[in-house]
Image (cartoon, rainbow, N blue to C red):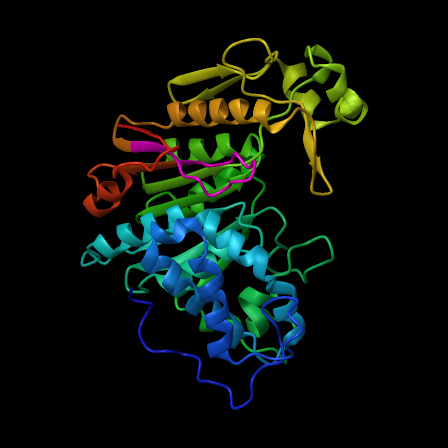
């Protein structure tokens, strides 16, 4: 796989004193670091499906390490091996599809892709794509999250720090830092947007989607109704050439209306607080509308077609019904999101790809491309599914 040409980061004469894990080994050379990550990824079952991508990822992450050399506190904040590899694995089906799309794209008309990464968090997916994709076909990657600071504001404790994206390129940052912004093969730009506010979405559309060239919209781990916003962005903006969505947690609902066994009711109090997310959709008695598809948000566990689920994560612990129950609700939620994706001028597919095992069930991936199809993308997506997985598409 082409990783973007010559290596922009010359090797350091001394091995950096950071660690890829909590290992007792005090320091690692770049080669040791890369080899360690490769061994970890090769052991994952998904490596057999995306062998070239899994083989390349350690080099991309090694480039991050070289970029932040000399700033150990920043590297320590950014790199937790288990977290970074988990982020890569869970985005791998999208990274593979986007790589195939961009590789097949003819940019001779002078129009490059803009990639928009919704609810991006720190931006690990965008950072990988910047190192992986060819800059002659991708203009920029925009990292959208409500937790970024405003562009002229110094990051505060409640913000996601953008130091790893910009460095001293931002005047409000420490000017002794390198200008990280200019080291990204494809430039990364942060954008503070609250996807639950219609006015901010309209502004985002005007800036990035309207007469701006082709857009790739990626949305990984979007919580609750944010997935609806992502589908609406695809439906409402024909400039969006390709769309990837991996929904996360379900919309909440009013637990007081649910016939739930007593053993699951130890979380009733905090979920039925007047301002809890779970109460909002129930009080509004909402019908979700996506394109030409509609579905009910207020659901009782025994009613067919239920998508909402009473429960939530707190301190990495699930409080609510068991996963055997929530799995069915999550799959219905993904089904309805898929049905709401406009396919009048697009091909689309929902695939179950087993990235989560050992009780995990968030394995639904949604893809869409406005016609004409990019053959290498859809040939790969339509390959025969392994046992236990399924695909639905147009």
Q: Is residue 394 visible?
A: yes
Residue at 66%, 60% in the rendered image: 153
Q: Is residue 172 visible?
A: no
Residue 111's spot in the image, x, y percent? Answer: 26, 55
In-front residue for pair 36/93: 36
Magenta residues, as a range?
A: 348-365
Residue 350 belongs to the span the image colors magenta: yes
Residue 333 belongs to the span the image colors magenta: no
Left/right placement of residue 225 relative to residue 106 reads: right
Left/right placement of residue 284 relative to residue 36 reads: right
In-front residue for pair 186/49: 49
Image label count: 0
Residue at 55%, 37% in the rendered image: 360
Residue 264's spot in the image, x, y percent? Answer: 73, 21
Quarter of the rendering containing residue 368: top left
Left/right placement of residue 336 relative to residue 269 reads: left
């Amino acid at each position: 796989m082409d990783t973007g040409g010559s290596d922009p980061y010359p090797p350091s004469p001394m091995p950096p004193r950071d660690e890829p894990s909590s290992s007792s080994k005090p320091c690692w050379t770049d080669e040791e670091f890369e080899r360690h990550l490769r061994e970890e990824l090769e052991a994952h079952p998904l490596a057999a499906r995306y062998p070239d991508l899994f083989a390349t990822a350690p080099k991309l992450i090694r480039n991050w390490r070289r970029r932040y050399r000399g700033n150990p506190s920043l590297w320590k904040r950014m790199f937790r091996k288990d977290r970074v590899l988990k982020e890569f694995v869970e985005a791998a089906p999208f990274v593979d599809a986007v790589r195939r799309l961009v590789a097949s794209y003819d940019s001779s008309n002078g129009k490059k892709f803009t990639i928009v990464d919704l609810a991006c968090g720190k931006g690990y997916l965008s950072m990988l794509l910047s190192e992986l994709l060819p800059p002659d076909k991708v203009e920029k990657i925009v990292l959208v999250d409500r937790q970024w600071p405003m562009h002229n504001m110094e990051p505060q404790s409640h913000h996601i720090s953008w130091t790893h994206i910009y460095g001293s390129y931002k005047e409000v940052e420490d000017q002794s830092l390198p200008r990280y912004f200019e080291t990204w093969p494809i430039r990364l730009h942060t954008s503070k947007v609250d996807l639950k506010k219609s006015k901010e979405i309209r502004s985002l559309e005007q800036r990035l989607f309207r007469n701006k060239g082709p857009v790739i919209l990626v949305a990984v781990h979007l919580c609750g109704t944010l997935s609806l916003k992502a589908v609406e962005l695809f439906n409402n903006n024909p400039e969006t050439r390709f769309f990837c969505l991996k929904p996360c947690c379900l919309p909440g609902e009013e637990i007081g209306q649910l016939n739930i066994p007593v053993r699951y009711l130890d979380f009733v109090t905090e979920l039925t607080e007047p301002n809890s997310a779970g109460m909002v959709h129930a009080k509004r008695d909402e019908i979700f509308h996506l394109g030409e598809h509609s579905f009910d948000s207020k659901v009782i566990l025994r009613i067919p077609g239920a998508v909402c689920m009473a429960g939530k994560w707190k301190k990495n612990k699930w409080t609510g019904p068991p996963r055997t129950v929530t799995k069915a609700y999550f799959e219905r939620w993904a089904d309805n999101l898929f049905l709401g994706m406009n396919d009048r001028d697009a091909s689309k597919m929902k695939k179950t790809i087993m990235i989560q095992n050992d009780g995990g069930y968030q394995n639904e991936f949604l893809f869409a491309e406005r016609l004409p199809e990019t053959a290498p993308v859809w040939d790969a997506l339509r390959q025969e599914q392994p046992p236990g997985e399924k695909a639905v598409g147009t």
